[in-house]
Image (spheres, grey):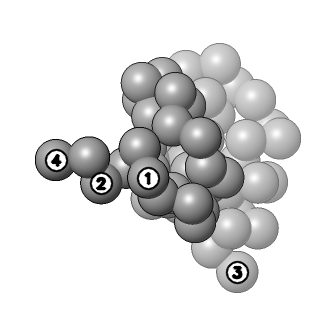
Amino acid sequence: MGILPEFKGIAVHVGWKFYNSYECDHALCNAHLQRELTGTEENYKQQWAKEMNELLNE
């Protein structure tokens, strides 16, 4: 459709590598970021991930 190749704003999306090929600014979706942080905390026992998740909730 040619929409994203011409987009010049900030694309908020999941961390799918393909999206990085577009020439615009990028931001991760907070819901997906928090899911990844929860996984990092639970699977790797990383305290920083728990703290970052709490900060995002505030």
Pointers 2 and 3 in contact (C-beta within 8 Å): no
| Residue 20 in sight here | yes
Measuring from the top left, give residue 13's x and y in whole percent. Answer: 44, 50
Image marks 1 and 2: residues in contact by CB distance under 8 Å: yes
Q: Where is mark 1, residue-wise?
A: 6
Is label 1 in a helix, a strand or a loop? helix
Amino acid under label 2? Ile
Residue under label 3: 58
Amino acid type indicated by mark 4 = Met
Kindly identify the residue that appears in the image at 70 percent across and 80 percent down. 58
Which numbered disc flags the more N-terminal residue, 4 or 3?
A: 4
The CA span between labels 4 and 2 is 6 Å
Q: For numbered disc 3, what is the local secondary structure?
A: loop
Q: Residue 38: in sight, yes or no? A: no
Label 2 Cα neighbours within 10 Å, binned few <14 / some 14-19 / many ≥20: few
- For mark 4, what is the residue? 1
Q: CA distance from mark 3 to mark 1?
A: 35 Å
